Image: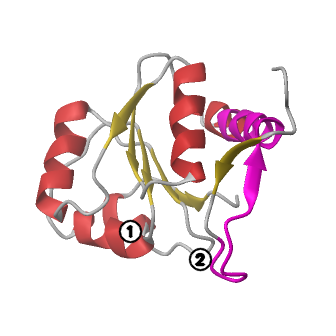
Amino acid sequence: MQSPDAAAYLQFDVASVAWPPVSWQQMELRIERTAQAMQALRLRRGERVPILLPNSIDAVCVDQAALALGCVPVPMHALDNPAGIAFILAASDASLLVVHSEAQLLAIAGTGTVLPYLCHIVIATDTAASGNAAFGPPVTTLAG
C-alpha cells in the first residue's frame, strides 16, 4: 500500500449532504473488522454469503471479508423481488445472509421459502432486529 491515507472511495453522507472520502487504510480496517465478525460466526470455507445490499462501502467490506475467509459471496440485486431473492438463497445453500433492512428480511420470509442452510442473518441498518422469527436463525446488525 503506497498511500494508505489516500482516498479509496467516496460515500454519500446524508446528514452532511457531502461525499467524504474513505482511505485505503480505513477500508482495510473495516474489512478486517467485518472478517473478524464473520469468523466469529464460525463460517467454513466455501460457505455461501448472499449480499443483499445497495452499492456501498458496506457491500464492498462484506464481499472482501467473505473472500478473505474463503467463503463464496453471492451478489444479489438489492431491488429484486422477494420471491426471486428467496429462490437464489435456496439454490445457493446460503449460510449467512446480509440484508440492508428488516423490511427486506420480512418480505423474503413472507415467501415461505425453506432455507435449511441459513444459520445467520445480518441487517446492515442499525435498527433493532425483530425479524429473527422470520426464518429462525439469529439476527444481528452490522453494528453488532
Q: Nearer the viewer, residue 141 or 112?
A: 141
Q: Which residue is mark 2?
A: 128
Residue pictured at 19% horizontal, 70% vertical: 110
Label 1: few (<14), some or many (≥20) within 10 Å? few
* Quarter where residue 84 is shown: bottom left
Q: Which residue is mark 1?
A: 133
Residue pictured at 76% horizontal, 36% vertical: 24
Span shown in magenta:
13-35
User: Residue 43, position in %: x, y?
Assistant: 53, 28
Secondary element under disc 1, as helix, strand or loop, is helix
Q: Are marks 1 and 2 in contact (CB under 8 Å)?
A: no
Residue 73 higher or lower than 139, as above or below: above
Q: Is residue 30 magenta?
A: yes
**Quadrant in which the C terminus is drawn:** bottom right
User: Residue 8, position in %: x, y?
Assistant: 69, 41
How far separated are the C-alphas under marks 1 and 2?
13 Å
**Disc 2 residue type?**
Ala
User: Residue 23, position in %: x, y?
Assistant: 78, 43
Q: Is residue 25 magenta?
A: yes
Disc number lying in front (1 or 2): 2
User: Residue 143, position in %: x, y?
Assistant: 70, 61
**Disc 1 residue type?**
Ala
Residue pictured at 27% horizontal, 52% vertical: 77
